[in-house]
Every structure is written in C-alpha cells, then in structure tokens.
Image: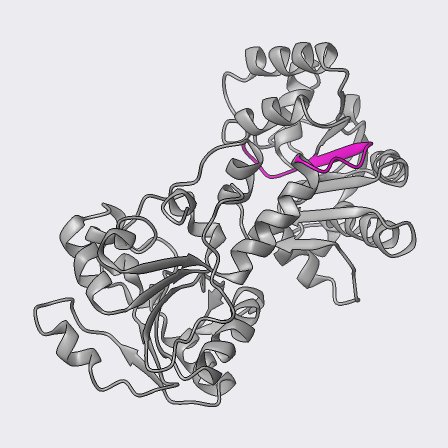
Amino acid sequence: MDKINYFPDNLNIQNKRIILRLDLNVPIQQNKISDDTRIALCLPFINKLVEKKAKIIIISHLGRPKGIKDPKFSLLPIYKYLKKSLQTNVFFFMGNFDDEINEKFSHLKEGEIILIENIRYFNEEINNDENFSKKLGSLGDIYINNAFSCSHRKQSSIHNITKFIDKSFAGPLIKKEIEAINLVIKNKKKPITCIIGGSKISTKINVIFSLIEKVDNIIIVGAMANNFFSHENFKIGKSLIEGNTKEIIKKIYKEARENNCEILIPDDCIVGKTFNGDGKIRELDEIQSDEIILDIGPNTIKRIKKKIDESNTVLWNGPAGYFENKNFSKGTISIALAISNNTINKSLISILGGGDTLAAINKYNNELSFTHLSTAGGAFLEYLEGKDLPGLSVLK
C-alpha cells in the first residue's frame, strides 16, 4: 500500500480543474446536519486548493438513493454549509451529465468551487459505468481522491474515473488513514487490544480472523456479543441475534487458542424492555424473556478498562450498546474515556474507526484524545483485513 501516488504539495495547480472526491456523507435530520465531523475534516484541504487558485469540482454521495433523485438525500444542506464555511464562490450543480456538461462547467474561475449534487442519484455511478466515468473525467485536469471511507467501492467517481484523466492522486486524509492503520499492522506496539462492536458478526468475520493473527486481545461488545452468549447457552430474551453463527464462533475460539489471542465477551449487561426506556443491570443468567440487552454492565466495563490499561495499542470499531439512549451509553462512554486517558497519560496508540463510534463519542461533549479518529467503517475494516481497496489500487 506504500506505493500510492499522494498529492504533492509543490504541484502548480493554478487555473487547473481539480476533481475532488470527498466523503461528505453526514447525518441529516430535518434538513439540518447533526454531525459535521466528516465535512470539517475536509475543509483544510479545500482551503489549500482555493489558495493555490485551482478550479475545484467536488463529488460526494449521501446515503443510498439507488439512482433515484430523492430530495431526502440531497446535498443541499452540505452546499449551504460549504458556502458559509469557505471564503470563495461555491456553486451547486443539480443537472445531468449530458453532452453540454463541459460547457456548463466552463465558467468556473480560479479559486471557485462547484459541488455536484449527490453522485449516487445516477445508477451509472454505482455500476462503475465507463461512459459515465469518461464524462466525469472530462471535467478535470487532475483527480484527487480524499475519501478513504469510499475507497473499498468499485464506483465511477472512485475507480473508473482514473482511466479518463491525466493525473490521479490520493489526498491527505487518505494518507493519514493509511499511516494510522499501519501503526497497528506494521509497527506493532504490543500488547494490542481490539474492541469490536456493532450488530452483525457476519460483516466482520474475516476481519476477526485476520485480527486473531495480529493482536493479543479481542473484546466483543454491542449486539454482536449476543451471538456469543447464545453460543454459551445463555437466554438473551428479545435481543438482536443473527442466525447460524454457532460454527463461526466455534472457529473463532479455536483460531484464538491456536494464535494465543484472548477473546473477551461481557459477563454482565444492561437490559431494557424497549429501546427508549430505562435500564437494569443483569447477570447473563438472569435475562428475562421480554428484555433486550442494550449495553454492557459495570463488571464488564471494569474488565475492559483493565485490558485497556495493560495495552500499548488499542483499536476500536463499533459502540458497546444502544448509545442513542443515554441510559444505554455508559459502556461506550466508559471505553472512550479509558482509551482517551491512556492516550494522554501513557502514550497509548489509539485508533478509532466507524461512523457510529464517532457519533457516540461526539454525543459526549467533553474533550477526548485519540491518536487517530477514522471516519471510515467498511474501508477501515477491509484495509485492516489486508484487502487491496479498488479506489486505492488505481492510485498506485
């Protein structure tokens, strides 16, 4: 992965048309951005391109509109945010990519920006369509992918576009992501602990097997842990569970034993009758048939903190519970605080990934410190797994 072609600082880009692929996929409620982390991270580089007098064409997506121009997936709130945050003219392009497309973009002046409406409004984007990629490529002189979180997808604005443009580079956010993940994979500072949350084990099986060979401890939290409880024959009430995971879990434990990796699962939890109600502490053998497991319990928090204290590197992907309700957010916040304190006081290398993990931390308003916060979910995990990401392989 080290041979990626990164955007060089000294390149003269004055009057050059730059196609900038960003990930501005932020949560929007009632037309308002509820978490601007991803956009804020992109602003310094946009400003740099503006200062260098480039003509900037920004491509991004929002959600999964499946090729339909659904207004709830419009980038309009993001356009307004950029207009307010950037000291230059920002335009919004809502048209089609027809034969007049180049004429429509020819009026852009040095240091100005056009944001293209949600690129996933076009099915050709999802299908990595050659003609569509060619039209996109014809808009610019230079292509810069600064969206690590989308780079595991074979889509027009990430993958095929590079065939139709002279120069293609990876941006600074991609460089930062790769350097951070390499801290774990290549420059191992043991012991390494990996905390994996979220709901589905099936989407993370390969990552877990890959990590078992690389780390010392794997801590399973979130709804994913329910499968492990069920495997140990505990009743889990109405909690979320995935079918057919018994064999997978058996294999996880077997591989872990062979690789001397400890698997740690919760030994108590917080349950509720509904997602919006109050919580009660339960041991695993006390869960009632009408209860849902929605967070880890105090004893589990203690054990996880101890593991974090004993580690030199911690990797965390996925919250510990249903953090949207503060009654079930204690596990996630406690993990965040323990990692942050060790990062500040004991030079722990801490790398956090995934949109939900970031959203959970952002709900907690106090200042927290981590070595690296990754906005990427799927791409973060696939890179950890050692996969070659299509969006990066075309930039080598």
Magenta span contains residue 189: yes
Instruction: Count the labels in the image.
Output: 0
**What are the residue bounds of the magenta stretch?**
186-201
Q: Position of residue 382 (x, y in %)?
A: 51, 36
Tell me: residue 38, above or below residue 52. Answer: above
Q: Position of residue 247 (x, y in %)?
A: 56, 10
Tell me: residue 93, above or below residue 137. Answer: below
Left or right for 128, reference 396? left
Residue at left offset 23%, top offset 62%: 136
Choose between 288 and 208: the one closer to the eye: 208
Q: Position of residue 148 (x, y in %)?
A: 49, 52
Q: Position of residue 329 (x, y in %)?
A: 73, 51
Residue at left offset 78%, top offset 59%: 369
Left or right for 14, reference 300? left
Tell me: residue 251, above or below residue 73. Answer: above
Is residue 362 visible in the rendered image? The answer is: yes
Magenta span contains residue 217: no
